[in-house]
Image: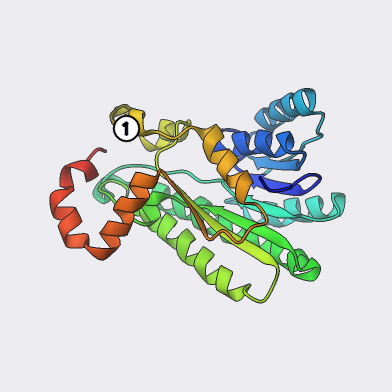
Amino acid sequence: MTNIKSKNVVITGASGGIGKALAVEVAKRGGIPIMMARSIDKLEQIATQIQAEFQVEAKVYQLDVRNKVDIKRTFQQVMAEVSTIDVLVNNAGYGKFDDVVDLSLDDMSGMFEVNVYGVIACTKMVLPPMLKQNSGHIINVASQAGKIATPKSSVYAATKHAVLGFTNSMRMELHDTKIFVTAVNPGPIRTDFFDIADSTGSYKQKVDKWMLDPDMVASRIADVMFTKTREINLPVWMNMASRMYQLFPGIIEKFGGNAFRQK
């Protein structure tokens, strides 16, 4: 278990799912969660819970990562109010599962704005101070979909491919610094992500028994803070499948077709 006591950990998309679970986990370990999301009411409720349970004063900021002006203003406010940003967890994201022909242009652009441009913009805000202090950790929540795409998740998978590409390149750019860069690639997680991604509920029902617990994922993320961990891949069997896909894509698509068409 890594020591994050008294460290300032910025978490986007912290009003639910992994983000909420991670804020609680950080507080449990003595860190200071700095939570960002669109819903300030939900953030304040979580902060109250954290204060009562762990006697840690979590900080909350309303932020829509699609708004670049708000990103700049919010991060400037954070940096003016805390001494350092030690960790940034780019967790905000959403998906919409549908065939390309049926996806709206608004959904397509929205996924890229949140999942890709939001990640890049938030990262650019913390990089200068991290470089100045020559320490920090940037953790980008991608997806197993960024390694192996499936029908009806083409645009979502494209955004997560982009996040992985950005993360890998940035890791090399920061090679000579003491700033760590990690990608998190989970499979389906039992959160409200599917309320938007899978409005029919059919996919969620089909994969329910394989869904990851958000508290477990959050614990794994907290475990690797300030370590040279390249990736977290969950679950293990899904990561093995994605590795096989990279080696034998034609064979995997041919014989794994039914598994790919769960959506």
Q: In this picture, is 85 found above or below 178? A: above
Whole-percent x, y for residue 203 in the image: 30, 33
Can residue 23 be seen from the camera position used here? Answer: yes
Say which residue appears at 52% left-offset and 71% top-offset: 169
Which residue lies most toward the front here? 1
Whole-percent x, y for residue 151 in the image: 25, 48
Q: Provide the residue designation for mark 1.
A: 207
Camera-side residue of 118 and 218:
218
Q: Answer left or right for 143 relative to 183.
A: left
Can residue 17 be seen from the camera position used here? Answer: no
Q: Amino acid at mark 1?
A: Val
Camera-side residue of 45 and 144:
144
Q: Quadrant of residue 30?
A: top right
Camera-side residue of 240 and 59:
240
Q: Answer left or right for 58 relative to 186.
A: right
Total tally of numbered discs in the picture: 1
